[in-house]
Image (cartoon, helix red, strand yellow):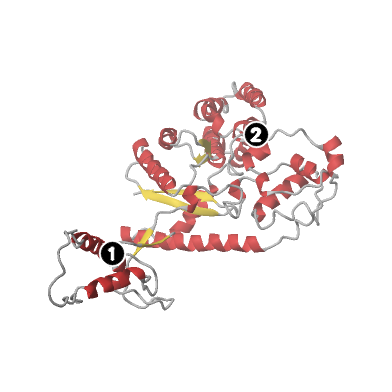
Amino acid sequence: MPLVQIVGSTATNHTFYIGGAFIQRENKATFAWLFEGVKDILYRRRIPLPRVIITDRDIAQINALKEVLPTARRILCLWHINKAIEAQFKRYFKDLISGPDLEQGRQMLNEEWDTFNTLWRTVYRASEPTTAFFAWARLQATYENNPYIGPMCRYLRIQWYPFKEAFFYCYTKQYLHFGNSVTSRLEGMHSVLKKALGGCQNDLPGVIQRLEGLLEAQEHKIKARISREKMLRWPQFPGYLWSTIQGKVSQFALQTVLDECHALKLDVGSPGAPEGLFRPHEWLLGHARPCSGAWQTSWGLPCPHSIARLILHGGQLQIEHFNIHWALDQRLNTPPTTADIARDPEVLPRHRHARANNERIPSDFELAEEELVLLARQAIEQASQAQEPEVQEEEGPPEGPPEEAPEAQEAPQTGLRRLLQEPPRRPGRSLYPGQFVFRLT
């Protein structure tokens, strides 16, 4: 049975294993069941639903995602697309490379592929939809009548061009994908999973046990990386601009911002910067390209234009300039909600052994003392109402000496009144009948 894997990326740009499932059939119903299970887990864990999902061109997966996660953007793996196109291109040229002049045929194949691939790259790498449309029209006009590459254009038009919004840069730059456009993370995690399972001869309980060990080790590594980055201060981010953001945002996010600034020739005062950079005021006046907002939209990071303005105004990078995905503490830029503070209580059973803080466990009569006090008050009220003296007419003085009143009935009332007047003696923790101890987790 095939094992479907789902992975994600952390703030430090490391891959983590979300989950997987053994499936019997790779159809829409099976994938919908799988995605519904993942969606239910995210809801119960109060985790936001994914905004972007990267897959290959599996029609069953795509249709299931449209049904279960309709708001998530879908991106097709660009690496698999180019590999499929290259294999199809070489299939059309198989007659050339199988003839008597084998080396000449291979050289011609490589030259034709380089030319075709260059035009194809201008299509899916175009920054605007209109530019991509004209590049696509130029590719069709160039090879439509070619006896070898003409079928290749028809292949592209039928198989891949209908999915252009899932891998053309002019469309994917509007998606918050954090720099991910291929499924290489999944391939790497697949290799890790195969090593953890140790082969295909395990039974289902053995596979589950190994997966649990893999997830525990993964959790420890992720927490160790995040704790390390919270304490370290990186030398390539000196100065006032970076002073407050270090330890709050991952080093990968800061390095990505710095590399983008250097790629656009903006000097942010980092040591070891390449030559030919411009100061912020010079860069904004004559060397900066217009800001399209694509960098901040797709990466969730501040663009060089906003950083240059921060430097000119003496500002600092704050956690609000970064998407929460890059935060080492995921609650830094969001106020805590009731769901974050109040969790389901856990009922702790009462134990009869000594506690860690050496507190004595109250006895049963001490736990029920409050109830006894209430019953005693009710008994006193009933007794006082029943023993109220009736008013009688006065008669002559009684003959003989007066009789002494018995004192036997005074003792129990005195004991109950003393119990009511004294505070409850309750050593240790104050517990009442029916009360539980809760611990917030």
Q: Which mark is residue 404?
A: none
Q: Against 357, is 62 above or below?
A: above
Q: Quadrant of residue 233?
A: bottom right
Q: How many numbered discs, if any?
A: 2
**In this view of the protein, which residue sits in the foreground, 291 or 189?**
291
Q: Is residue 273 left or right of residue 118?
A: right
Q: Secondary structure at mark 1?
A: helix
Q: Which residue is mark 2?
A: 125
Tell me where residue 348 appears, x and y as whole percent.
Answer: 35, 65
Tell me where residue 313 appears, x and y as whole percent.
Answer: 81, 44
Identify the residue at image location x=63%, y=43%. 300
Tell me where residue 340 appears, x and y as whole percent.
Answer: 49, 51
Residue contact between numbered discs 1 and 2, judged by CB atoms under 8 Å: no
Packing grade of label 2 (10 A; few <14, some 14-19, many >=20) is: some
Q: Which mark is residue 371?
A: 1
Query: Amino acid type of disc 1?
Result: Glu
Can the viewer see residue 161 in this picture? Answer: yes
**In this view of the protein, which residue sits in the foreground, 173 or 360?**
360
Q: Is residue 216 left or right of residue 252?
A: left
Identify the residue at image location x=52%, y=39%. 51
Identify the residue at image location x=23%, y=62%. 384
Can the viewer see residue 203 in this picture? Answer: no
